[in-house]
Image (spheres, rainbow, N blue to C red):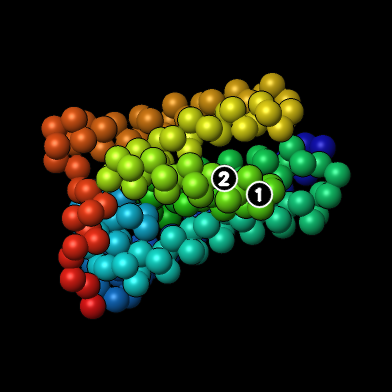
Amino acid sequence: MLSQTIIALLTGYLFGSIQPAYFLSKLVAKTDIREHGSGNAGASNITAIMGWKYGFIVAFIDVLKAMLAVLVIKWIYPDSPNLAYLAGIMAILGHLFPFYMNFRGGKGVAALMGMMLGINWNLGILFILLVAIPALLADYIVVGSLTAFIALPIATYILKYPTLLIFIGALMTLLIFYLHRGNIERIINKEELKISTVLKRKRD
């Protein structure tokens, strides 16, 4: 069982460490996306800096990589849903802390949606809505991100995962709030970039 857990953890982390925002910014703009905007390698920042076309590509890959991490472990260990859950969590952590980028990646919300799509596609759609609706209502993508991560331990409990995984889900929520502390401060100071502002910008 220990070897299976290690395989699930490594699989999730390696999938999650794939960073399309970083590679696209290097390839197309000849820069590191983390040196611009909010300073993270994720879909929202690359959308703000490089446009919706690249933002969509990054979001799609970020969702896909976490979903594949879960599906691969479900395929290898079909009778061990807990391992698939752990792979999803590690995909989020891989996205947040990629080893080859000095552990400075994105903010994890797309990976969370991918994780949930891999666990159950209906649940995945629910989490997409939990991101989209609050974000659009508040006009800040970070609000949707925090809402979705608040729902993570709740969904883990409802799906009757073991207490340890519920605790891990809760720790992930706390971690995400900590990583978004700058965004929260900017919202309070009315300095955070709004979705409507990005939508109004002309992009190639």
The residue located at (48%, 64%) in the rendering is 60
Name the residue that disc number 2 marks.
126
46 vs 133, nearest the viewer: 133
**Amino acid under label 1?**
Asn
Q: Residue 36 occupies which quadrant of the picture?
A: bottom left
The residue located at (72%, 57%) in the rendering is 72
Quadrant for the N terminus in the image: top right
Q: Residue 59 occupies which quadrant of the picture?
A: bottom left
Residue 33 screen position, x and y as percent: 27, 60
The image's mark for residue 136 is none
Name the residue that disc number 1 marks.
122
Residue 38 lies left or right of residue 61; in this view the side is left
Residue 145 visible, this angle = yes
- Per the image, label 2 sits on a secondary structure element best described as helix
109 vs 72, nearest the viewer: 109
Residue 152 lies left or right of residue 135; in this view the side is right
Whether residues under marks 1 and 2 lie with C-beta atoms below 8 angstroms apart, the answer is yes
Q: Label 1: few (<14), some or many (≥20) within 10 Å?
A: few
Residue 144 screen position, x and y as percent: 40, 41
Q: Distance between the Cα atoms at labels 1 and 2?
A: 6 Å
Q: Label 2: few (<14), some or many (≥20) within 10 Å?
A: some
Residue 74 lies left or right of residue 79; in this view the side is left
Residue 165 screen position, x and y as percent: 66, 29
**Amino acid under label 2?**
Leu
Residue 95 visible, this angle = no
- Per the image, label 1 sits on a secondary structure element best described as helix
The residue located at (76%, 51%) in the rendering is 74
Residue 90 lies left or right of residue 182; in this view the side is right
Quadrant for the C terminus in the image: bottom left
